[in-house]
Amino acid sequence: MRIVDVPMGEHGVAGYGFDIQDLEQTRGELGRFQEAQRELFDRLSAGVAQFAPDRSLTFFNQPFLQFFSLLPEWMSDHPEFDRVLDRMRDTQRLPEARDFPGWKADRRAWFNAVDSVEESWTLPGGQHLRVVAQPLPNAGLLLYFEDRTEQVQLSSARDTLLRVRTATFENLFEAIGVFASDGRLHIWNQSFRDIWGLSDADLAQNLRVDAMVELVATKLADPSRAQLLRDLVRIATVDRQARTGRMALADGRYFDFAVVPLPDGNALFTLLDITASRGIEEALRGRADALEEADKLKTAFVANMSYELRVPLTSIAGFAELLDGGYAGELPPVAGEYVKAILSSVGRLGSLVEDVLDLTQGAAGNLPLSEEHVDMSLLLGDAVTAARKAADAKPLSLIVDIEPSLGTMRGDPRRLRQIADHLLNNAITYTPQHGKVMIRVRGDEDVIVWIVSDTGPGMDAAQRAGVFDTYPRIDASNDEGKQLIGIGLPLTRQLVEAHGGSIALESEPGRGTTVTIHLPRRTGDHVQV
């Protein structure tokens, strides 16, 4: 109760009382509310300051002091609103303003505002603040300061990333389109738009893939395959599977496409123009086919010519043998020597023709081989005996180192003899007088190893690269004693490989040549018959 005593002079004192129970309860509740409100403000990360109707500071929290670098001792004197702004300016925690008195007057008008006022302040240090001024019913003012620096930086970074993404998409060789999980086209670049001929109106409404299929069907070489686009987007967005392939457009262009599911549920659709590379591919394929056909024609021509040459050679050899045998009468001594030279040349030419024929048959995979048990010591001994005559005539040294107990192997005896003859004749031919040719043969239970080496001029890298070619290049300008590349070694390689073996060559200019052959004793399925 509130008791009031009123003096009545001589009449005494009059008194009356008021029931203020509700008022005291309301005042207490208001005080508790204000105390709870201030405790809440102290726990906020935003800065809060409250001013009384006389514009004096009545409350502030710690973030407010930190935002504006103010000292609590100075704030405890309840400074006036204008003084607080002046101190904020002194600490360089206010936005730059040319007319600061006018700027301050505008903020003083917040006390008389009807509704709350919101502003964004950019401080000199780069900090961004969101400022809310809320007029209070008692003519006071509540200020709220929220640090938005991180949000602004993130927004700026996001905008930068979006611009970078857009610029990247526009400068890619590929056409890019991103479809959302609902099938709508959300992102695209100019190449994607140009390929499908989409208009601004279509793109502005985020065209659905179903509607897009109807628009682009005529762009495809096969319009019936337009539904494939919708299926690809569905597979990527719903089934979360990637797909790649190739499509042809009606204007003759070809594209490799890829549809990839993205982590956010969208689908990335890319198109890469491969028209030029496809044209080159087709041209190369046509050229390869033409070269293969030309190679077949060349092989057939060489084989045919080899057969054609054998007929006149046989006739020449037959008539020369008749003359040499005296069936046409006694020949003068000089004529007899000429006939013997003819027989020798015909024999050499016939051997070359046989080699060419074998070479062409081997290239075609039709080289006939027999399979017998061959005594290698006897075969190599005969080959060495035949080669020694040529070595003695040159003259040069023929060194033989053949294991006596070499044993047998399965193969074609005529072809194996050809291997030995070609290796020895090649070495003897290209070794100068008084040089050395060596044949060394060793074997174990599984493999027989032949090594034929000479002290000839050797071969450079270019000659070694083509030494086993089916149709080797023959250097006709051999005026420096370099070793020529004939048909002996290519034929030898075919014969060795036909028996399941391998051949290797080592040679350097001025250091001679070494040929190494590995032949399995049991060729079995390796023999090509």
Image (cartoon, rainbow, N blue to C red):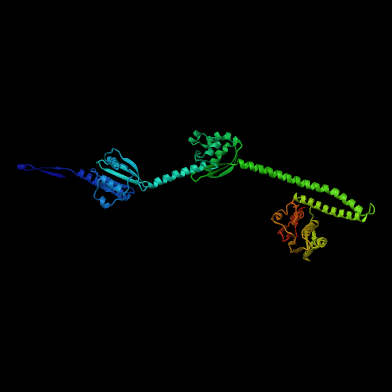
Q: Is residue 23 left or right of residue 523?
A: left
Q: Is residue 238 visible to us here?
A: no
Please name the residue shown 91% across and 55% down the image: 334
Q: Choose between 304 and 395: the one closer to the eye.
A: 395
Considering every residue shown, the one lying at the far right of the view is 329
Q: How many marks?
A: 0
Rendered location of residue 256, percent (x, y): 58, 42
| Position of 487 relative to 201 (above/below) | below
Q: Is residue 150 left or right of residue 13?
A: right
Please name the residue shown 70% across and 54% down the image: 462
Considering every residue shown, the one lying at the far bottom of the view is 404
Q: Choose between 443 and 450: the one closer to the eye.
A: 450
Rendered location of residue 267, percent (x, y): 52, 42
Considering every residue shown, the one lying at the far left of the view is 10
Looking at the rendering, which quadrant does residue 27 occupy? top left
Q: Is residue 439 left or right of residue 326?
A: left
Rendered location of residue 152, percent (x, y): 39, 45
Q: Choose between 519 and 211: the one closer to the eye.
A: 519
| Position of 434 relative to 294 (above/below) | below
Q: Is residue 72 visible to us here?
A: yes
Q: Choose between 408 and 353: the one closer to the eye.
A: 353
Location of the N terminus (image quadrant): top left
Looking at the rendering, which quadrant does residue 458 occupy? bottom right
Rendered location of residue 82, percent (x, y): 26, 44
